[in-house]
Image (cartoon, grey):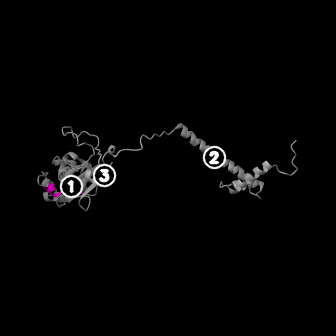
Amino acid sequence: MPRAQPPGVTPPLMHAIRQTVSEFSENTSIHGVRYIAEHGRRWVERFLWIVTEIVCGTGAAYMLMNVLSKFNENPTMMRVESYFYEVSNVAFPAITLCNVNRIFRSKAQNFVDNLKMPEGYPMARQDIMELLPLLGQLLSFSELGSDLVGRERLVRLLTYNNVTSDVLTESLSQPCEDLIERCSWEGREVNCSRVFTRTMSYLGYCCSFNADRDFSLPERIDPNVKRKPLKTTFFGYPLGLTVLLNPQVDDYFWGPFASGGVVVSVEH
């Protein structure tokens, strides 16, 4: 028969459990647990801390079950197709070149000299040049200024000559064949007119490379049809796109910046 424990003596198992709980409570970083088993605490304090821990544990369990439920309802599936992706499979970035000068003086003077003047037009021919910088305000609402009278006179003049503001802006800007004198792609000199296309941007009419056409295809194909972007197996600046530019700063008349040159935009 097992020998009975003397009165007042704690069994070894219970003693070990109490000691373990006491040591855990004193050393755990869980807030509030140490106060439950701390010596000298009144039973009211212990009871409040027990209730607090139960409420917090229940809330944490509820939040965990809610997250698991959402995960099971909307599983996320991931698959790695390849650890490697060749650079030749990535399209070469689209390059856009914009002359900061929107209106060239020689083109503007030629336009003014050949204008038909409406009867009773309130400006002399030599003063019409001062109205041309208002073309940007006719093309974009973001550039609207306070010269309402000047815009009205310019619109009247363009309407009388059957010229739209966008067509006039394009004719007064620099063509791509004048801006870009020489081009090379993958180390080979190519025809710049087949490489770059005329595009419209916030800086006016610009010249874009690899934006919407593949110049490596035969010229008989309609250039207005969008094609796949160019890709290259080479790397390094000599084998990418190289251009020789001539912004013709000596013929500047008006632009949004105080300086001259070409703005280069790289897009992917």
Queried whether the magenta region covers residue 96, the answer comes back as no
Q: Identify residue for label 2.
A: 59
Disc 3/disc 2 C-alpha distance (Å): 52 Å
Asked if residue 204 can be seen in this view, the reply is no
- The answer to whether residue 89 is left or right of residue 184 is right
Disc 2/disc 1 C-alpha distance (Å): 68 Å
Residue 83, percent across and down?
Answer: 42, 44
Q: Using the rendered view, name the quadrant where residue 254 is placed.
A: bottom left
Residue 207, percent across and down?
Answer: 23, 50
Q: Identify residue for label 1.
A: 244
- The answer to whether residue 149 is left or right of residue 27 is left
Q: Identify residue for label 3.
A: 266
Viewport quadrant of the N terminus: top right
Dots 2 and 1: beta carbons under 8 Å?
A: no
- The residue sitting at 54% across, 37% down in the picture is 73
Residue 143, percent across and down?
Answer: 29, 55
Q: Using the rendered view, name the quadrant where residue 82 is placed.
A: top left
Magenta-drawn segment: 100-109
Residue type at tag 3? Val
- The residue sitting at 85% across, 51% down in the picture is 9
Residue type at tag 1? Leu
Q: Which mark is first along the chain, 2 or 3?
A: 2
